[in-house]
DNA sequence: CTACATCAATATAACGTTTTGATAAAATCA
DNA sequence: TGATTTTATCAAAACGTTATATTGATGTAG
């Protein structure tokens, strides 16, 4: 008997001596079935261990109870945390989540988008790989869509993101308080709205201090460890190295640390390092790393929540303006940042909001 | 027009002036449709941007083209890598994967198991949270099931796992070559087959060297950072501390390193540390960490492959004995292991197979 | 005692596909 | 030419649910 357990409502009905409609009514407990029949049906269900076919149900009701989540790169712990948030919220409402990894490739992303459409998921959470490319998927009519982390350029969409601009503005001001004047910034791909906003935050802080030298020390990476390593080596070995390096994501910070250790450059003695994104190794690495912690889990949770809202109130959705949720980050000061050589020391707070 | 794009084959048929069956034949290109009608149908499909409803298709064919993946804890990068392997293999065969995080809770695990059953996924990949509890789900008839990483006790099942026994046997022998005699082992939960096998591997190596003192220095953690930290503190502060600590997973190693740094215990000067599981921070932490790297991605990939095999040949499956795939690990020697104080130095290979 | 709600249960028609068997037209053969 | 096969198309019946309309049965009001 290798055969799958594919009992149907018909089997239950036969066994309980009732009609299929009655079984359905019991399963969905509509409350319209008498107590005796209800009992009989439940007994029959238990007897053959029946479970309703969600696919068939979905065909009839138009709801699949599935959410799609497409992330740039599941290798990044940021997205794993977000995934946890999404899943917790989804489960709470009886949804399952289809996880897709676009691996930083826009072609894979749209392939996944298409697969999710075939599957008729009830809604989609998307962390797009390219903010420009993402604009094009906007017009198409598909399931409700919520962007997380990264958003399409110049478009008003439902989304949940960190306040990237302000976070970076504050971080750079913190570095300047420590006396740093030559601050190098390693960005992620500038096709990500996150990178763009973060750079703008840095720029504003610099400009306010009449330091417009940002341009020469701004280098574009690709958010991966390797690029952080490569750029880190370059910066540290340059004739006139920066006194502080700001990496705009956690993977690249790992690369910079690698370069730092390899060249045995004292940190924060000769150069300070600060990074966007916290991680669980930040207090074990040498030196311990000062970071800007995003509310990663919350981004996922809030995103799923917003999406489920949209799903459950399609009427309002049409009317309402897209909702943009902006979350705050936290500056976690650790060992990798210190006064610039010859700079103003100043008090170093341990954790600043 | 907020309405979802829910064109059906009927719409396509009407538009192309053919029957629904013909449309279906074109979509599944059975090759039985003449060139002129094929063209007409394709044109119609493109015109209204039709996409077939996979749910309805699944209802008819009995195949949902979905795989379920249940992992112990998605927070552990090990499972993320496995997930990547699963997804890559799944996509290649036109499957999507439903990811479930049981969060180390056996009740959540079975809840997910049930949800996957409702969804009628074509197969399930399971990294069970408890090897004893996992035995109970064995009898039930559900979709084809493949275990990864961790398996039910005393049961012959389809699975893909690392050769935990041998890996640990070799690791302990390596430590003993360095002159270590007092080796502490921090295990994961002993309800995991992985932990059990790993401990046995250690035990055998110790016994061969007539060192049966393992018992006193064997401590059970729970695979999380915090437990590694706590146990690490205890071990390092004990009156007669070990000269080497072997953590049986990567999260706990992070905890031990934290304890090490906090107490400023020189490593590998006074104590060597080695850990199961590699991670991307192992060469950035201080000291760089010697590890046993599992073929994480491959575990997922091979698991998915085996599962798809089972799905596509249900006839053979009934006959064939369950298939157990055992993968080898790699010892990555880094900075955290060195000769025991007063021990035999010996040559330290950089990477041993 | 008829007429009319109320209620529990059911028969039936969807939902969007695939598949089987039927049909007509075209091609092959004797 | 007439019989037979092949080919291209289609109509209709599933698949397992839910939703709507219908049926009796029971109770209530006039």
Image: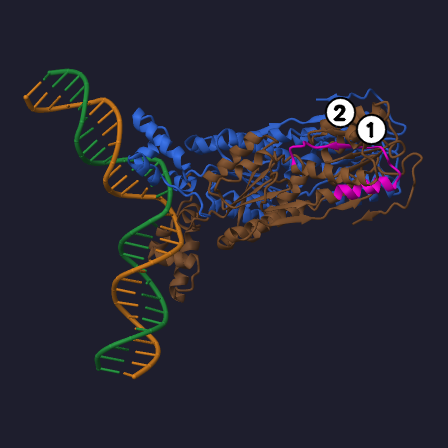
Chain colours: A blue, B brown, C orange, D green
Camera-side residue: B284 or A313?
B284
Q: Quadrant of the C terminus of chain A?
A: top right
Q: Is residue A248 visible?
A: no
- Of callouts 1 and 2, which one flags the residue occurring earlier in the amino acid sequence? 2
Q: Residues within 10 Å of mark 1 (few under 14, many from 20)?
A: many
Circle 2 chain: B
Please tell me whether residue B183 belongs to the stretch shown in magenta.
yes
Q: Which residue is label 2 attached to?
A: B230
Identify which residue is drawn at 73% across, 22% down: A352
For mark 2, give the secondary structure: helix
Q: Say which residue label 1 marks.
A: B260
Residue A311, x across and y down, in percent: 46, 33
Q: Is residue A194 left or right of residue C24?
A: right
> CB atoms at circles 1 and 2 under 8 Å apart?
no
Front position among marks 1 and 2 = 2
Based on the picture, tell me whether residue B190 belongs to the magenta stretch.
yes
Chain letter behind tag 1:
B
Give how far apart the Cα atoms at labels 1 and 2 are.
11 Å
**At which x and y percent is residue A336?**
81, 30
Question: The magenta stretch spans which residues?
Answer: B167-192
Asked whether residue A89 appears in the rendered view, the answer is yes
- Could you tell me residue B137's position as x and y percent? 53, 37
Residue B43 vertical position relative to residue B68 in the rendered view, above or below: below
- Residue A341 or residue B267, whichever sits in front: B267
């Amino acid at each position: 008997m290798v055969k799958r357990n594919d009992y149907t409502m018909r089997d239950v009905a036969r066994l309980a001596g009732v009609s299929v409609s009655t079984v359905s009514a019991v399963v969905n407990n509509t409350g319209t079935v008498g107590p005796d029949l209800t009992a009989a049906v439940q007994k029959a269900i238990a007897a053959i261990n029946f479970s309703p076919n969600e696919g068939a149900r979905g065909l009839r009701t138009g709801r699949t109870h599935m959410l799609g989540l497409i992330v740039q790169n599941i290798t990044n712990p940021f997205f794993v945390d977000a995934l946890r948030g999404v899943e917790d919220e989804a489960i709470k409402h009886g949804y399952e989540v289809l996880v897709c990894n676009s691996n930083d490739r826009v072609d894979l992303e749209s392939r996944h988008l298409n697969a999710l459409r075939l599957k008729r998921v009830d809604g989609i959470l998307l962390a797009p790989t390219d903010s420009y490319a993402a604009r094009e998927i906007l017009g198409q009519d598909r399931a409700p869509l919520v962007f997380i982390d990264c958003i399409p350029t110049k478009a008003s969409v439902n989304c949940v993101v960190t306040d990237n601009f302000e976070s970076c503005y504050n971080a750079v001001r913190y570095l300047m308080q420590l006396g740093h004047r030559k601050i190098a910034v390693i960005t992620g791909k500038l096709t990500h709205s996150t990178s763009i906003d973060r750079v703008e935050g840095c720029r504003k802080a610099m400009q306010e201090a009449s330091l417009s030298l940002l341009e020469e020390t701004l280098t574009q990476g690709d958010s991966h460890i390797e690029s952080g390593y490569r750029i880190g080596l370059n910066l540290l070995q340059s004739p006139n190295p920066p006194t502080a390096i700001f990496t705009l994501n956690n993977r690249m910070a790992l690369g910079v640390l690698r370069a730092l250790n390899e060249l045995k450059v004292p940190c924060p003695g000769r150069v300070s390092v600060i990074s966007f994104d916290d991680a669980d190794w930040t207090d074990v690495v040498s030196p311990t790393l000062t970071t800007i912690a995003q509310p990663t889990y919350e981004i996922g949770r809030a995103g799923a929540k917003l999406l489920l809202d949209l799903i459950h109130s399609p009427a309002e959705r049409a009317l309402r303006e897209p909702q943009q949720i902006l979350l705050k980050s936290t500056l976690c000061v650790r060992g990798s940042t210190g006064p610039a050589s010859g700079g103003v020391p100043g008090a170093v707070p341990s954790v600043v909001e």
